[in-house]
Amino acid sequence: MSLTLWHHCTLATLQADAGQTDVAQPYGLVPDGALVVQGATLKWVGPLAELPEALRAQCSTQHDAGGALITPGLVDCHTHLVYGGDRAAEFEQRLQGVGYEEIARQGGGIASTVRATRAASAPELQASAARRLRHLLAEGVTTLEIKSGYGLALEHERKCLQVARALGAEHAVAVRTTFLGAHALPPEFAGQSDAYMDAVLRMLPVLHAEGLVDAVDAFCERIAFSPAQTARLFEAARALGLPVKLHAEQLSDSGGAQLAASFGALSCDHLEWLSEEGAAAMAQAGSVAVLLPGAFYFLRETKLPPMDMLRRHGVPMAVSTDCNPGTSPCTSLLLMLNMACTLFRLTPEEALAGVTRHAAQALGLKDRGVLAPGMRADFVLWDVSHPAQLAYALGANPLIQTVFEGQVR
Ligand code: NIG
Ligand code: FE
C-alpha cells in the first residue's frame, strides 16, 4: 500500500512520552515533525530528521503542511446531538429567574424536548442534527458520541439512535452511540419511575440486538433516577457486555460516581458535586471525568467540579460540548477548550488532552486521541504556532484542514 508523508509541521502528539529526549515535552510537541500515513493508519510519527530514508522513499505522496500545527482529530465524547425543537423560550424563563429543576418539575425541560423529538420524523431529526454536526466538523471533530434520551419510548429511542448511525454513515466522522433511555421520566409514566425503568430494561436488549448501542448512560439525579434504579440498568448493560457511563453529581451528590465506578464505568460526566469518595472510586476504576463547561456556564452554576481533587486522585479529565437543547446548546468544542481553562482552571494542555487523548479514553477507544504509530490517521492542521492558542482565542476557527482515516476531509 502506498504511503503518504506530511511534513513541514509542528506536531502536538498529546503523548506524554513524545519528543526527542527522555524528558516529556508539553503537549507531546515535536517541532519540525513528520507523519507517515498508510491507508487509514499512522505508520510513523516523529521529527522529520529522524524519518528513515527507506521509509521516506516509499512515500509516493507528500504534503507540505506549510508550518501548521498538527493535533490528533478532536473527540467530542458527550453529546445529545439528535433532538427536536429548541428551548429558547425556556432560556428566557431562566433569565427571568426560574430554575432549571423548577422548569423540569413543571413539565418543561427535558420533557418539552421529548415532545418535540417524538413529533419529528427521522429525516427532520437528521437534518437538524446534521446542521449542528457540520459546526463540530468545521472545528476538527473526527469522532463524536451521540446519546439518545429524548425519545423515552422504544420506537423513538430507536429513531434517534438510527439517526445517529446515519449521521456517521453520511459524514466523514466516527459516531459512537449511547443509549440514554434513563434520561427522564416520560409523561405516560408520571409517578412510576420503577415501572419506567422496567420499560428501559426491555428496550435495551432490543436496541442492542439491532446494533444501535455502543454504551449505556443514565441521569442519576433527584429529578431523574436514583442510584438503585441506575444500578438495575447497569446490571442489564453488564449482562449484555456493554460499557456504562453516567450523568453523575451534576445538581447534587447522589453517590452516582461511586456506583458507576463499581461497574467499571468508562466515564462519569458533569461531577460538579463529586465527593472525595467518588473521585477515589473513579481513580480505582479508571473512569474518566468528563467536564462540561458549557452546561456549567449556560445554567450559570457556581459550584465548580473539584479539579484539584481529580488531579490529586489521578483521574483523567476529558472536556466535551454536552451539545443539547437545555443546558448546553453548544456546537463549538474549541469554545469548550477556552471555557475549560477560564471557568474550570484547566491548563490549556489539560484541556487539549481533554478533547483528544482523554476523550477517546472516555469512549473506550484505544486507537485514537494521540498521534502515534498504529493509531487512526485522524488529525487536524491548524493555523497556530502553539497549541495553547487553540484554547486562548474566543470565536476564532484556525482550522486549515482535517484528515479523517487518512483522507483529507
Ligand atoms: O447533560 N443532565 C442531563 N442531561 C442533559 C441536559 C438535558 C436537557 O436539559 O435537555 C445534560 O446536561
Ligand atoms: Fe449530557
Image (cartoon, helix red, strand yellow):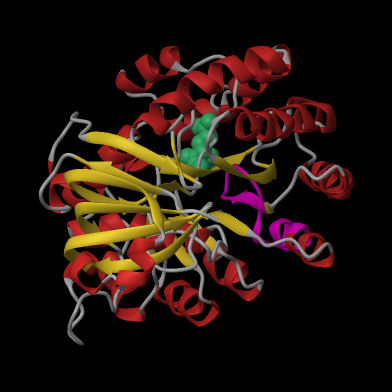
Q: Quadrant of the C terminus?
A: top left
Q: Is residue 91 above or below residue 401?
A: above
State which quadrant residue 236 falls in.
bottom right
Question: Closer to the camera, 6 or 323?
Answer: 6
Name the outermost residue toward the bottom.
Answer: 22
Residue at the spot 39% in from the left edge and 67% down from the top edge:
372
Please state the horizontal and vertical placement of residue 6, each as a whole percent of the image: 30, 52
Q: Is residue 298 left or right of residue 77?
A: left
Q: Is residue 228 magenta?
A: yes
Residue at the spot 69% in from the left edge and 52% down from the top edge:
214
Q: Is residue 77 above or below residue 357?
A: above
Q: Quadrant of the N terminus?
A: bottom right
Please state the horizontal and vertical placement of residue 208, each as a whole percent of the image: 82, 48
Residue at the spot 17% in from the left edge and 84% down from the top edge:
21
Please state the horizontal and vertical placement of residue 406, each as a whole percent of the image: 47, 47
Q: Is residue 370 magenta?
A: no
Question: Closer to the camera, 72 or 273?
Answer: 72
Question: Closer to the camera, 265 or 142?
Answer: 142
Q: Which residues are magenta?
A: 216-233
